[in-house]
Amino acid sequence: MRCVAGLLLVCLGVLPAVAAEPAKKSPAALPATGTVTLVCEAVYMPARATWARTVTVGYDQRRIREVAIDGQTVYNFAIQATVILTALDNERIQIDVASQTWSSDFRGLATAQGRCERS
């Protein structure tokens, strides 16, 4: 799990690419804690409404600690390679930090897809 979380931190641009492998650098060389903010323009279908969604990812040297969407901290999240999987208010959300994309589903009633930018 440490390697997968390291890969996600590399994709977020938090750690240098060599940090995904066991580093021989001193711990002081890596950032202790921090946050990365992504702004995603998601288009919701079938209404074709565009919403700006803000995703904040809190991390430390070893893993992602917290994910918040539009200022609301999610209760639980999972990481698969470079994708953050979570849910908020009946919306299942997937954020791929490598390709910087947003994808979500309101239990089959509506779907959304969009691009994200780091701010």
Image (cartoon, helix red, strand yellow):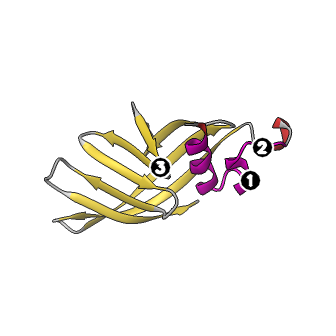
Q: Determine crowd level at label 1: few under 14, some 14-19, many 20+ residues with C-alpha closer than 10 A.
A: few
Q: Position of residue 32 (x, y in %)?
A: 74, 36
- At mark 3, the secondary structure is strand
Q: Between disc 2 and disc 3, whose residue precedes?
A: 2
Q: Is residue 12 magenta?
A: yes
Q: Quadrant of residue 58?
A: top right
Q: Is residue 87 left or right of residue 37?
A: left
- At mark 1, the secondary structure is helix
Q: Which residues are magenta?
A: 3-24
Q: Is residue 94 magenta?
A: no
Q: Are marks 1 and 2 in contact (CB under 8 Å)?
A: yes
Q: Position of residue 114 (x, y in %)?
A: 37, 65
Q: Is 75 or 25 nearer to us in this picture?
A: 25
Residue that numbered label 3 is attached to:
55
Residue that numbered label 1 is attached to:
18
Quadrant of the image containing the N terminus: top right
Residue drawn at x 48%, y 58% is 39
User: How far separated are the C-alphas under marks 1 and 3?
Assistant: 25 Å
Q: Quadrant of residue 77?
A: top left
User: How far separated are the C-alphas under marks 1 and 2?
Assistant: 7 Å
Residue drawn at x 29%, y 54% is 104
> What amino acid type is highlighted by mark number 1?
Val
Q: Point out which mark residue 32 bears.
A: none
Q: Between disc 1 and disc 3, whose residue precedes?
A: 1
Q: Position of residue 36 (x, y in %)?
A: 59, 49
